[in-house]
Amino acid sequence: MNKLKKNEVYKVTILDVTHEGAGIAKIEGFPVFVNNALKDEVMDIHLIKVTSKYAIAKPIKIEKSSKDRVDPFCEVYKRCGGCDLQHMNYEAQLILKKQIVENNLRRIGGFKEIKVNEIIKMDNPFAYRNKVQYPVENNRAGFYAKNSHDIIEHDECLVQDEKVNEIMNYLKDKLDHNIRHVVFRIADEGIMLIFVSRTRTMGMDIESITKKFSIIKTVIMNYNISEGNVVMGYENTTLFGKGTIEDSLLDLTFRISPNSFYQVNKIQTEKLYSKVIEFAGENKNQTIFDLYCGIGTISLCVAKHFKNVFGIETVEAAVNDANINKEMNHIENVTFICNRAEDEIENLYMNNIKADVVIVDPPRKGCDQKLLDTINKMKAEKVIYVSCDSATLARDLKILCESDYIIKEIVAVDMFPHTKHVETVVLMSRKDK
Ligand SMILES: C[S@@+](CC[C@H](N)C(=O)[O-])C[C@H]1O[C@@H](n2cnc3c(N)ncnc32)[C@H](O)[C@@H]1O
């Protein structure tokens, strides 16, 4: 029976760190998760929540500090929900992320002997985010606090582009009260600025903003009255510029629309895609499927090595961008289809169009079982799985390995330094190959 009570203070030793970056301690066998604590540290903690199964605490005095502890570089780190690992030095963050992937593969996937390659890190892990979303409420703009919708205001966020800080500081006291979010997308061409609004009218002086910041190439008003947590609606009105923005990756140019997915860290995306290209190999007689293809970035990057490419994506605006990207880059052997990947792969298979190589890059929830079954049925030689959630990755790899696939190589890529998130690329092949 748990005897702990909220607001009590205890001295503990941190036994390990969770995949969320919290320290784990035990008080008379009862688990306590300690925010911003590192393995082997000894500290006084204050219990801020106690449930029947666990407690949550924050450190109040660190008696023995870990060699991996550093001072967070951000003033609002302890309150803001954006970064989770700023109290660890970068090398320790990388070790933790590799462990998170390995632990999930062992625990959820059942891969006891699994090995993950050295994580691909950033040389300078700052100013990397090319998409930033500021919630706005009662004329306050910032990022959400951890596990809440309280807005934490700040003047400078060092993981995003410097120019965004400057523009946002200028906009802060000028925001129309109907604006729910301010979204920035940064590309080679410049900045796309999106005002997500509760109304279809815009009470902001767009001309003065674009005159002051010539780096802003397009301004969009996005209409969203939904109650939920989804930041953007699907109705966009272009207030300035052409409504899209262009970026380059690995010598190709991509057009990005306001609602289309685009990887948030350009430097690391090029490393990630290079790994995917290496894993896919080259065979001009073969067909490759790029499932969950977004604006077609991976499809177009691998096209020159294969006979045919099929890119499948469910968001119509992203498929439109993909088709324009195909034209802009003068690539002909790629077909983009707007449908759910799990349905379209079945349609293609029924029509006798089979992939020799399948790339999947699903959202956090991972792949549908039906999709994994169809990959197995069509006997694709290789599967390349790109994942932003190693828990669902582990679940899906288990399904593929229970059919006819084996894991050949696993690489983790640090796309999101100072956060708990980690990207993983896995190469699989059929057992009989
Ligand atoms: C992680 S993103 C990857 C996009 C792309 N591969 C890239 O690197 O930019 C996942 C994409 O899957 C799309 N998506 C989500 N559910 C889908 C489904 N059931 N079928 C096809 N696409 C889906 C999303 O719209 C998003 O573009």
Image (spheres, rainbow, N blue to C red):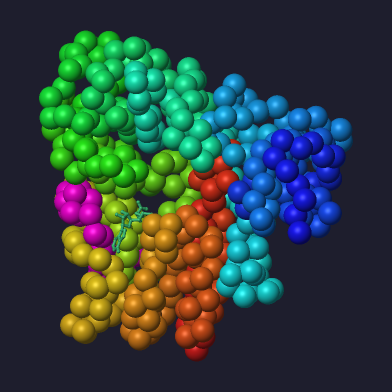
The residue sitting at the bottom extreme is 432
Q: Is residue 415 magenta?
A: no
Ligand 1 picture quarter? bottom left
Residue 343 location (% of width, % of height): 24, 73
Residue 381 location (% of width, % of height): 41, 80
Q: Is residue 349 left or right of residue 133?
A: left
Q: Which residues are magenta?
A: 303-324
User: Can residue 210 be seen here?
Assistant: no
Q: Is residue 121 left or right of residue 415?
A: right
Residue 329 location (% of width, % of height): 22, 49
Residue beneath the point at 48% across and 25% down: 152
Seen in the picture, residue 169 relative to 217 is either above or below; the reply is above
Residue 79 location (% of width, % of height): 57, 29
Q: Nearer the viewer, residue 287 or 215?
A: 215
Number of dots carrying numbers: 0
Q: Is residue 304 magenta?
A: yes
Seen in the picture, residue 286 relative to 98 is either above or below; the reply is below
Residue beneath the point at 51% across and 41% down: 147
Seen in the picture, residue 209 relative to 127 is either above or below; the reply is above
Residue beneath the point at 34% across and 20% down: 138
Q: Quadrant of the N terminus?
A: bottom right
Residue beneath the point at 16% across and 22% down: 202
User: Can residue 121 be seen here?
Assistant: yes
